[in-house]
Amino acid sequence: MYKVLVMDGVAEEGLAPLRREEDIEVVIGRKMTEDELVETIPEYDALIVRSATRVTRRVIEAGVNLKVIGRAGVGVDNIDLEAATTQGILVVNAPDGNTIAATEHTIAMMLALARNIPQAVARLKEGVWDKKAFLGVELRDKTLGIIGLGRIGSAVAKRAQALEMNVIAYDPYITEEKASTLAVELVSLEELFRRSDFITVHLPKTKESYHMIDERAFAMMKDGVRIINCARGGIIDEDALYQAMLSGKVAGAALDVFEKEPCTDSSLFSLPNFIATPHLGASTREAQLHVALDVAEEIVAALRGKLVKNTVNIPSINPQVLSAVRPYLGLAEKLGKLQAQLVTGRIRKIEVIYSGELAKQEVSPITTAVVKGILDPILQQTVNFVNAPVLAKNRGIQVFQAVDGEAEGYSSLITVKVYSDKVEKSVAGTLFGKEDPRIVMVDGYRIDVIPSGYLLYVPHIDKPRIIGPVGVLIGEHNINIAAMQVGRKQIGGRAVMMLSVDAPVPEETLAEIARIEGVLDVKMVHL
Ligand SMILES: NC(=O)C1=CN([C@@H]2O[C@H](COP(=O)(O)OP(=O)(O)OC[C@H]3O[C@@H](n4cnc5c(N)ncnc54)[C@H](O)[C@@H]3O)[C@@H](O)[C@H]2O)C=CC1
Ligand SMILES: O=C(O)CCC(=O)C(=O)O
């Protein structure tokens, strides 16, 4: 039975995909302190939040059963992604469901700013009919500067154009083609500051965007500029905004988000031309239903080990790519696991080389499977597709991936080379047919072994009285040999023997095998 904790008032109707699963129990959590959440979380397999709950490192480390954290929305800045990744917990979000809600809120804020609507409503409710105090401005022919031309920025651009505004944008990560499809002029940040009558931000809060709009930026802007932030608090420096509004440089500002939330006290609240909402951008019935449905479906998929679309802490994999590489994931993991048991010393470098047909595919998921296979037998903690690359990096292991046309006669070949401070070892595998995995090479010696169960690896000198005595010693312990492969490059040179056995060979027998003259090493491997 899986248990899912749902926080922050995520829409009940949207939880239907979870509620219809018989082995999933949904628990609606009340507002909790960090300590309370730390105490509660160990019994849960999944957690769903909006923006209020802070999923800190402490919470994540206490979540010993957590497999997935879902954000019913876009921004994941309330989730410690690094901690989740290290712990092997998948983080998913619902990036599309609230785009229109946040877009319409932005347009509403811009119109409210231009026409002083909140202030006029408040005055009228005080019983004052004051027409003179609220002279507004029109949007038509004004320049709107959009910082961040993603989902919401693009949708804001379309609506602003319908209001006959001239739209310019700054987004160094999108192409000129995308901007021109939207009929938006891409400009530098400085030019956007200099030319805009209204500026709206639609980008995540990152190191780069933190206080992107600060004192220096305000100094570059037109007198009387109006500023909107329905993205994330902290992109605008609130102290600098206060000063710029006091001086009259900024004619009005509308914030839906604040650097510290909830924000119930701010010097900005004293300014008549400042308007604000309490992070309402995504608060429409439609958006809340959509994000809840999207995230609930993702949680079900993640718990079932199925394809998850909107992953935040591992690269999302295109379904076509996944179906091409999926058959190789198991083989890759086994090759990694084999290496982990053959290699001695501290691993410094892993190199995964792809040849043949496979070399034409996007192979990074296969490389991750190799790394997972290598680290899993070595580390105490759970190693999965989420944390394998991070754990390798944290341990100072370099991971390289390369393609090489030479597949040694196989249609596709995966070669895994591991370099430690003591040895350098290479193993290779392929699929016979579409799904029959085989280890076909160890240290350049050709073999043909099914990567499963117990394997005995015996490198030796190619001469008589080795294979027989090894078989006898194993037989004496009543252990059945299911298959045997010997690979050599030249008569009388080095060779490798790989035996599939039905049970582990005891330590003392391994020691006896190692004493046979001509045996160079002996290792029991379990795949
Ligand atoms: N107020 C609210 O309730 C809501 C807030 N949001 C927030 O709105 C923001 C935008 O959301 P989406 O449009 O869905 O995201 P998105 O990922 O589709 O778009 C973000 C855009 O910002 C651009 N960008 C990133 N760093 C940049 C930089 N340093 N300078 C300029 N551009 C940069 C990216 O290239 C991308 O095009 C996010 O921060 C999200 O959390 C989203 C929904 C509701
Ligand atoms: O869930 C909410 O109310 C906030 C949504 C939001 O900020 C986001 O999706 O980034």
Image (cartoon, rainbow, N blue to C red):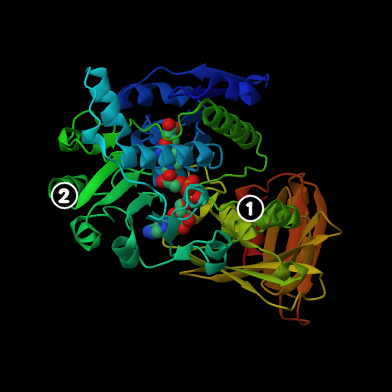
Q: Which residue is mark 1?
A: 317
Q: Nearer the viewer, residue 472 or 527?
A: 527
- Helix, strand, or loop for circle 1? loop
**Percent coordinates x, y for residue 374 in the rendering:** 57, 56
Report the residue at 53% width, 24% height from top. Answer: 4
Q: Is mark 1 within 8 Å of ligand 1?
A: no
Vertical order, 494 against 140 (above or below) = below
> Three-letter amino acid code at disc 2?
Gly
Q: Quadrant of residue 7?
A: top left
Q: CA distance from mark 2 to mark 1?
A: 49 Å
The label on residue 248 is 2
Asked whether the viewer can see residue 496, the reply is no
**Percent coordinates x, y for residue 256 in the rendering:** 34, 37
Q: Nearer the viewer, residue 432 or 115?
A: 115
**Percent coordinates x, y for residue 519 in the rendering:** 66, 68
Quadrant (top left, top right, bottom left, bottom right) of the N terminus: top right
- Helix, strand, or loop for circle 2? loop
Report the residue at 74% width, 78% height from top. Answer: 406
Q: Nearer the viewer, residue 171 or 359?
A: 171
First in sequence: mark 2 vs mark 1: 2
**Percent coordinates x, y for residue 154 in the rendering:** 51, 52
Q: Seen in the image, is 476 located left or right of residue 9? A: right
Q: Seen in the image, is 349 located left or right of residue 336? A: left
Report the residue at 66% width, 43% height from top. Answer: 307
Q: Seen in the image, is 57 located left or right of residue 334? A: left
Q: Are marks 2 and 1 in contact (CB under 8 Å)?
A: no
Q: Quadrant of residue 112?
A: top left
The label on residue 443 is none
How many other residues sit within 10 Å of disc 2, few (<14), some (14-19) or many (≥20)?
Answer: few
